[in-house]
Image (spheres, rainbow, N blue to C red):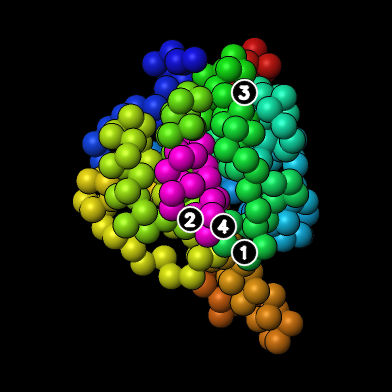
Amino acid sequence: MTGSASTPAAALRTLLAGDEVVHLPGVYDAVTARLAVVSGARAACLSGAVASAVGLGLPDLGFVHGSQIAARAREVVPALDGVPLLADADTGYGNALQARHTTRAYAAAGVAGLHLEDQVAPKRCGHMTGKAVVGVAEAAGRVRAAVEAGTDVVIVARTDALSVEGLDEVVARARAFVAAGADAVFVEGAGVPELAEVSSVLGGAVPLVMNRSEAAGSVEGPDDETLAALGVRLVIHPVSALLAAARAAADTYAAIARTGHAGDVSRMAWDDLTALVGLGDQLVLEAAYAEEAAQ
């Protein structure tokens, strides 16, 4: 289903239909969402691993549910001010019926797009060992159910089969996802050779999405020109901001414990934070309402 030109989903489709690579930083609350917007991000992503870590204090082993990710998206989306959010839908949290329900829940939360994977449940972080994938028919069924959920949410079909069953199986799944109506294909763990093969087989039928996550080790990789030529249009950076924030918080807590204050730790000024979250605009509104009430 295609949304109106004014929806975040339509904006995300426009990025997918473009001829350049767009980088999506990971966000997980209103402050990180506002920071992403200020940085000039054209889209952002919400990771299930990050939602599990921040919301539950647990690793990405299937503890977090779509309802919890949708709840976090409802906090994030308003602060993005129209910048589209691509959210992790893991396995859809069940069979095709659950994938359909998850898509509708994400749409209600304002999510512009989701990526839906083919792991068994409970799933594991894509960069962990011990993964397993469902059969291609079941995986494609999840995708079709999400596509036919009656929303304008962009459906990115992800496969984790590369490290489990090899490139031939990835290609078969990519074809099945396109046939099921996916808007884009996401091959977890793919490098240039794998992306080139999938792109060649699909013949440009849909764009590709790439994961550039510190969970996989180095975040170095091919440049945007190379990726664009391979059909990649979105590159997600799901955990970078959380890792940076956690490092800064750890340094701050250590400094307080060591010296009784955080004076030596680099941090944002209080006035900058209050400006970021709109204090100035709120004070102007407050003054206007007070003036109106006094009349």
Number of residue marks: 4
Q: Are marks 2 and 3 in contact (CB under 8 Å)?
A: no
Q: Position of residue 96 (x, y in %)?
A: 68, 27
Residue drawn at point x = 58 percent, y = 70 percent: 248
Is residue 75 among what the camera can see? no
- Residue bearing mark 4: 164
Residue drawn at point x = 28 percent, y = 42 percent: 200
**Three-letter amino acid code at the position of disc 4:** Val
Report which quarter residue 251 is drawn in.
bottom right
Camera-side mark, 3 or 4: 4
Distance (Cα) linking label 4 and label 1? 11 Å
- Residue bearing mark 3: 145
Camera-side mark, 1 or 2: 2
Q: Secondary structure at mark 1?
A: loop
- Residue bearing mark 1: 128
Question: Is the residue marked by circle 1 packed among few (<14), some (14-19), or many (20+) residues within 10 Å?
Answer: few
